[in-house]
Image: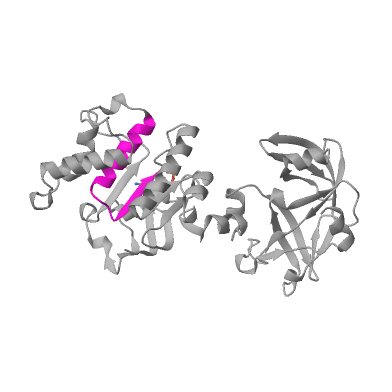
Amino acid sequence: MTITINRLARRFADFRALDDVSLSIAPGEFVALLGPSGSGKTTLLRILAGLDFPDSGDLLQDGRDLLQVSARDRGVGLVFQHYALFRHMTVFENVAFGLRVRPRARRPSKAEIAERVDKLLKRVQLDGMAARYPAQLSGGQRQRVALARALAIEPSLLLLDEPFGALDAQVRVALRRWLRHLHEEMGLTTVFVTHDQEEALELADRVVVMNRGRIEQVGTPDEIYQQPATPFVFEFIGKSNKVPVRIHGARLQAGDQRFEADALEGLADGSAVAYVRPEHLALSTTPLENGWKATLRHVYLSGSVAHLELDVPGLGQTLEAELGGEEAQRRSLQAGMTVTVQPRHLTVFPLDGKTGEPDLARRRVVHPRYGQAALARWR
Ligand SMILES: Nc1ncnc2c1ncn2[C@@H]1O[C@H](COP(=O)(O)OP(=O)(O)OP(=O)(O)O)[C@@H](O)[C@H]1O
């Protein structure tokens, strides 16, 4: 069951909540829609569920026009952050609800419903709680009931909108791992909305990064983190340093440093913006000819990682670097030290001469050449 989303647009008055969104979801996939508040994630999910309709574009399921199919007949299971369970119904009755309200011809028998609910409660590890009311459950347990309720109708597509958003961090982590197992065991196709990048990167087969109603990038968690396609993705996912640069005769002028690199060949001279992740900055405590001179302002350890704040006068800005905590200790890195900073690689977006906006089509990953002496010293 492949879902094809083709050029969907949804406006609310003048506001474009979805703007030319296309995406294909393969059977058995776990897709995360990730983006800041207001980026259009929920709007897209509601259209998939049949709770809202686009102004233009197509939505197909194996070639069938889903927009002509009512929410009830789409066979989707839905779980929201605050998907209020029916308070006056027991856990059992809540889970059985979707089956009991079916038209008689498609309604399973009482015994079948009971069997299916029992099975589902075991799956979500709530067997023994069938007679409880929602008020007698923890937040995590309630969301598992909501999930069992969504699964009771054997949905062809499971849609989850920040299902763990209201839960505390530890429960969230435990539940998302559990959800991933459940997805695999049951062979579900799942679309999961979140604004939590860690959750998306850990859970999903593919992450769809959304911004202002548009898709910025679709990729595996590794691709999204390692090869961001746009400045937005660099800034939204993980940490990155943003450095204004100039391309000048196939060299990169970054503050008082000029880096040579092959990838720049063919790019016209002009301004650009470069991004470099903290873990892609190499530091040398012995002065090197190539690289920014910096003063280590702060070193702080967070678990096994050392975060370093570097003042770089030659750039006129602060850079953030990261390395293993043990390595930082072995090298006795301390605030006040002078170091040379060399980016291992940077992603460069030339700025469009007319609009001044980053030109995504001319994006280049640049590996500066430093010469053997420099490399040998920080190996
Ligand atoms: N019924 C509506 N009428 C007017 N504007 C709406 C409506 N529904 C959504 N919007 C607007 O469309 C934009 C996208 O909303 P949407 O709920 O899809 O974002 P989101 O990415 O899910 O955000 P969040 O993470 O905060 O839930 C928002 O600016 C929202 O205010």
Q: Could you say which is closer to the camera, residue 205 or residue 258?
A: 205
Q: Is residue 336 left or right of residue 25?
A: right
- Can the viewer see residue 372 in this picture? yes
User: Is 137 part of what is drawn in magenta?
Assistant: no
Relative side of 368 to 99, left or right? right
Chief SS of the magenta region? helix
Q: Nearer the viewer, residue 231 or 96?
A: 96
Report the quarter where the C terminus lies.
bottom right
> In the figure, residue 122 lies in which quadrant?
top left
Residue 7 horizontal side relative to residue 346, left or right? left
Q: Residue at x 42, y 47 (%)?
A: 180
Tell whether 306 sits left or right of 181.
right
Q: Nearer the viewer, residue 92 or 290?
A: 92
Q: Quadrant of residue 10?
A: bottom left
Residue 304's spot in the image, x, y percent? 68, 39
Q: How many marks?
A: 0
Write the residue at 53% across / 55% down. Answer: 221
Residue range of the region highlighted in magenta in the rendering: 139-161
Depth check, front residue: 15 or 261 = 261
